[in-house]
Image: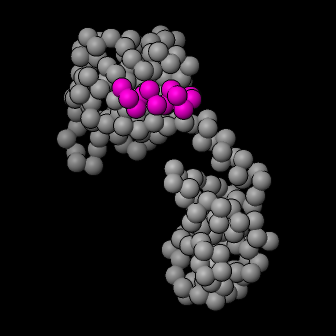
């Protein structure tokens, strides 16, 4: 498969056409990226053949198969194999040995993720764990959305607490009072606005808040 030479485009191979893999592949196609999707299951290959441009049935643990597919020419790979940990690990190893420069891999446990990193994955993602964590934070607090990083730093979207209504950020001073940073403000029917000291916050506005996890959680629970 010929690669595009547009500087803004990357070629990506997505291996594993379960829910996670197909979501990644479809999103990449929507973004205009070149995608080759691979799965060993002929039923999944047939199912997605009409929706994804390039879909191939293949055993990605086989070095020779990867060579024939020209995998070394791809910029990035996403290994979305789920329950078959052995196939997941062997596929990452084969991709690394083929020379794929940037490998992303799905892991179902921390131990699985650790092994994937050791055999060549530069990025390991935990979809179920991450989503479960996000939902837990949203259920127990006033967050609309939530994302936590490895170093206990978080970004959340929440409705503006009462103490910020009809005040500028300089007046309500969330950084001074709560040690969090308001990154932006979203008002219904208006575009997202990056926060400035003079930004006026109104009731029903949504705030994008960043800071240490504990302080972001505390701020989002203010009534």
- Farthest residue in the right direction? 223
Question: Which x, y percent locates residue 48?
Answer: 48, 22
Q: Main secondary structure of the magenta part?
A: helix
Question: Which x, y percent locates residue 185?
Answer: 59, 72
> Which of the 4 quarters of the picture holds residue 15?
top left
Magenta stretch: includes residue 180: no
Q: Is residue 127 visible?
A: yes
In the image, is residue 157 above or below residue 195? above
Q: Residue at x 28, y 44 (%)?
A: 9
Question: Which x, y percent locates residue 38?
Answer: 40, 20
Q: Which residues are magenta?
A: 108-119
In this picture, residue 59 sits left or right of residue 101: right
In this picture, residue 215 sits left or right of residue 59: right
- Farthest residue in the left direction? 5
Q: Residue at x 69, y 69 (%)?
A: 219
Question: Which x, y percent locates residue 11?
Answer: 30, 35
Q: Residue at x 65, y 80 (%)?
A: 177
Q: Which image quarter is the C terminus in?
A: bottom right
> Which of the 4 quarters of the picture holds residue 30?
top left
Q: Is residue 49 visible?
A: no
Display colour scheme:
one colour
């Amino acid at each position: 498969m010929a690669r595009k030479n547009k500087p803004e485009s990357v070629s990506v191979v997505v291996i594993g056409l379960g829910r996670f893999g197909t979501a990644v592949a479809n999103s990449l196609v929507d973004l205009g990226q070149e995608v080759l999707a691979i799965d060993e299951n002929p039923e999944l290959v047939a199912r997605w053949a009409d929706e994804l441009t390039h879909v191939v049935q293949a055993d990605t643990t086989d070095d020779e198969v990867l060579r024939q597919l020209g995998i070394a020419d791809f910029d990035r790979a996403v290994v979305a194999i789920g329950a078959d940990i052995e196939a997941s690990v062997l596929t990452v190893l084969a991709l690394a040995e083929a020379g794929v420069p940037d490998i992303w891999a799905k892991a179902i446990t921390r131990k699985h993720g650790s092994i994937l990193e050791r055999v060549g994955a530069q990025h390991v993602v935990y979809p179920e764990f991450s989503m479960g964590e996000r939902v837990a934070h949203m259920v127990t607090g006033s967050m609309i959305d939530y994302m936590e990083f490895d170093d206990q730093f978080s970004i959340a979207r929440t409705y503006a607490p009462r103490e910020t209504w009809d005040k500028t950020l300089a007046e309500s001073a969330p950084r001074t009072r709560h040690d969090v940073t308001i990154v932006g403000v979203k008002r219904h029917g208006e575009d997202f606005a990056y926060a400035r000291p003079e930004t006026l916050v109104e009731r029903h506005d949504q705030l994008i808040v960043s800071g240490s996890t504990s302080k972001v959680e505390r701020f989002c629970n203010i009534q």
